[in-house]
Image (spheres, rainbow, N blue to C red):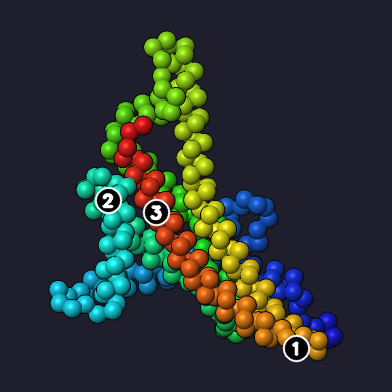
Amino acid sequence: MAAEAHGPTASEYIVHHLQHLQNVKQKSIVDFSVINYDSIVVGLVLGLIALLLLWAAARKATSGVPGRFQAAVEILVEMVDNQAKANIHSAESRKFIAPLGLTVFVWIFLMNFMDMLPVDLLPVLWQGATGDHHAYLRVVPTADLSTTLGLAFAVLLLRFWYSVKIKGAGGWAHELVSAPFGTSKNPIFALILGVVNVLMQIIEYVANTVSHGMRLFGNMYAGELVFMLIALMGGAAALSLSGVLLPVGHVIAGTIWTLFHILVITLQAFIFMMLALIYLGQAHNAH
């Protein structure tokens, strides 16, 4: 009875909050049999919200004096369009890539914004709905590596698609064996350089994709941890007579970090979108 009434320690609290709602327990670092239901459901819901917001802005757009919502969306659209023009010189490709960049920015921003909600709000509501006080739930999809790497992998597939579409299968294949070190008229040297060039291209694609996903994941995961540590300050104050100043520190630290994190979640969404545009732009350019 005493053990059941005892509250979780700080480490137990953090470990519990970092556990996903999964189909099976993860047994290794890389386990493709694991499905994080919370990341998938929250990500899909926020993706639908992003599309509805953009659709509502387009539907209510007027040539007269715009409202605040329309003005904000127009500024965002112009910003993304300018970045797309700077990186992708094909007007035909921009018809798809520019709206894609806008959608990616809004979608990732909304997923990042879930980190601004109180740490225990949705997990406690989920535990109450399921009747299981130990039920797991994580509500920040971008703090899940499978989400961010999945998005980065989608960008990689688009890079392959546009490389073939713009340069042709033969042109892209020639680029793979001739860049970055060029080729040679000597068949032996040409073969050696071709193998080296292909290996370098593979390394570049892998490095770009991994860093693309890891950058977003690392920042959001760290932000989530900081919010948990700040939340523990309030809990420690409730359990300790000597922690009189902890509630004050809890409020101050929470406020400062929240204001700073607004910049972080916006910047990370922008960086992910910009890298996607840059990589797709590289697929249009010949080495």
- Looking at the rendering, which quadrant does residue 249 occupy? bottom right
Q: Nearer the viewer, residue 25 or 259?
A: 259
| Element marked by disc 1 | loop
Within-10-Å neighbours for mark 3: few <14, some 14–19, many 20+:
some
Task: Say above or below: 130 vs 217.
Answer: below
Q: Earlier in the sequence, mark 1 or mark 3?
A: 1
| Residue 120 vertical placement versus 286 (above, below) | below
| Residue 126 visible, this angle | no
Residue found at x 57% / y 79% = 255
Of marks 1 and 2, which one's residue comes earlier in the chain?
2
Q: Nearer the viewer, residue 60 or 85?
A: 85
> Disc 2 marks which residue?
85
- Inspect the image, locate mark 2, and give the three-letter code of the amino acid beneath it: Lys
Q: Residue at x 71, y 74 (%)?
A: 13
Residue type pointed to by label 1: Val
- Marks 1 and 3 sit apart, C-alpha to C-alpha, by 46 Å
Q: Which mark is residue 274?
A: 3
Kindly state the secondary structure of the residue where label 3 is placed.
Answer: helix
Q: Which residue in the structure is indicated by mark 1?
A: 244
Please give left or right for residue 241 compared with residue 39 in the image.
right
Image coordinates of residue 60 in percent, x first then y, are: 21, 77
Residue at point 43%, 11% (across, down): 187
Residue 40 relative to residue 176: left or right: right
Which mark sits nearer the N-terminus, 3 or 2?
A: 2
Quadrant showing the N terminus = bottom right
* Structural crowding at the residue carrying mark 2, measured as other residues with C-alpha within 10 Å and reported as few (<14), some (14–19) or many (≥20): some
**In contact (CB < 8 Å): disc 1 and disc 2:** no
- Distance from Cα at disc 3 to Cα at disc 2: 12 Å
Query: Which percent across, then down, holds residue 179?
Result: 41, 28
